[in-house]
Image (cartoon, rainbow, N blue to C red):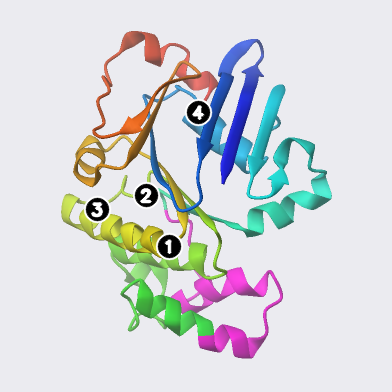
Amino acid sequence: MIVFENVTKYYNGNIGLEDASIQIADGDFVFLVGPSGAGKSTFIKLILKEINADSGRIIVGDKDVTALSNREIPELRRNIGIVFQDFRLLPKKTVFENVAFAMEIIHCSKSQIQKRVPQILNLVGIPDKADKYPDELSAGEQQRVAIARAIINRPSMLIADEPTGNLDPDTSNDIMELLHQINMSGTTIVMVTHAKDIVDRMNKRVVAIESGHIVRDDIGQYGYDEDCISCQEDAFLYE
């Protein structure tokens, strides 16, 4: 569960997010939409406690994020998987090693790693790529590796930041089907995207942010004007 209660974050006096209140239930699938600079990155960074709110309260799972000390932040993030637009794989490690790395940093045993990694690679549809390096894979395959790494430790929540941004339409559809399957298994997904076609087709919950304010929260289509001038003012301040 994610709860924002009247959350505000400013950057040098400019609005990143202002008086934002929202609840995202366990197992929900939410598209976070809006033009560049609207406040989407601020929203995600606050969940991860990469930045601190100026006021308000944020609950993630059973933790009051706004009250966490620095030493408690790693425990928060261990329960949140993250997938990026640019994959961020380790180029000198194989697919197996990239995925295993997420288990190694939480001190899983070698036997656990040897058992779990092949299971996850099979789940994301690349069981035959374990010994390949990132530069030997297609963009879609690299994103599947990134997703495998993000879910290998069974997080309750997955944040996907423009996961289809570098993919062609057919591959994007495949990745969205995979994310849908992960969501159906009970994982909460918050996906930042500008892909109107994907949002319209998936018919999930859509949260729109404009100039640091949540202006829409419902089920349905993208329904957002990317050319809205007011939404793009001072975009560089927020993203």
Q: What separation in Å lies between label 1 and label 4 (alpha carbons)?
A: 23 Å
Query: Where residue 228 sits in the image (x, y, percent)?
Result: 30, 13
Of marks 3 and 4, which one's residue comes earlier in the chain? Answer: 3
- In this view, 92 is above or below 83: below
Please indicate whether residue 230 sits to the left or right of residue 90 in the image.
left
Circles 2 and 1 in contact, beta carbons < 8 Å:
yes
What residue is rendered at 39% in x and 15% in y?
232
Q: Nearer the viewer, residue 200 or 128?
A: 200
Residue at 44% from the left image edge and 84% from the top image edge: 118
Q: Which mark is residue 169?
A: none
CA gap, disc 2 and disc 1: 9 Å
Q: Secondary structure at mark 4?
A: loop
Residue at left offset 63%, top offset 24%: 7
Q: Using the rendered view, name the quadrant where residue 18 is placed.
A: top right
Q: Which residue is mark 2?
A: 163
Q: Is residue 120 left or right of residue 78?
A: left
Name the residue type under label 2: Pro
Q: Residue 121, percent across and down?
A: 40, 77
Q: Is residue 70 visible?
A: yes
Element under disc 1: helix
What residue does disc 4 label? 239
**221 or 12: nearer the viewer:** 221
The crowding category of the residue bearing disc 2, from other C-alpha atoms within 10 Å (few below 14, some 14 to 19, many at least 20), is many
Numbered tag placed on residue 147 in the rendering: 1
Q: Which residues are magenta?
A: 87-115
Secondary structure state at the residue bearing disc 3: helix
Image coordinates of residue 231 in percent, x first then y, are: 39, 14
Nearer mark to the viewer, of 1 and 4: 1
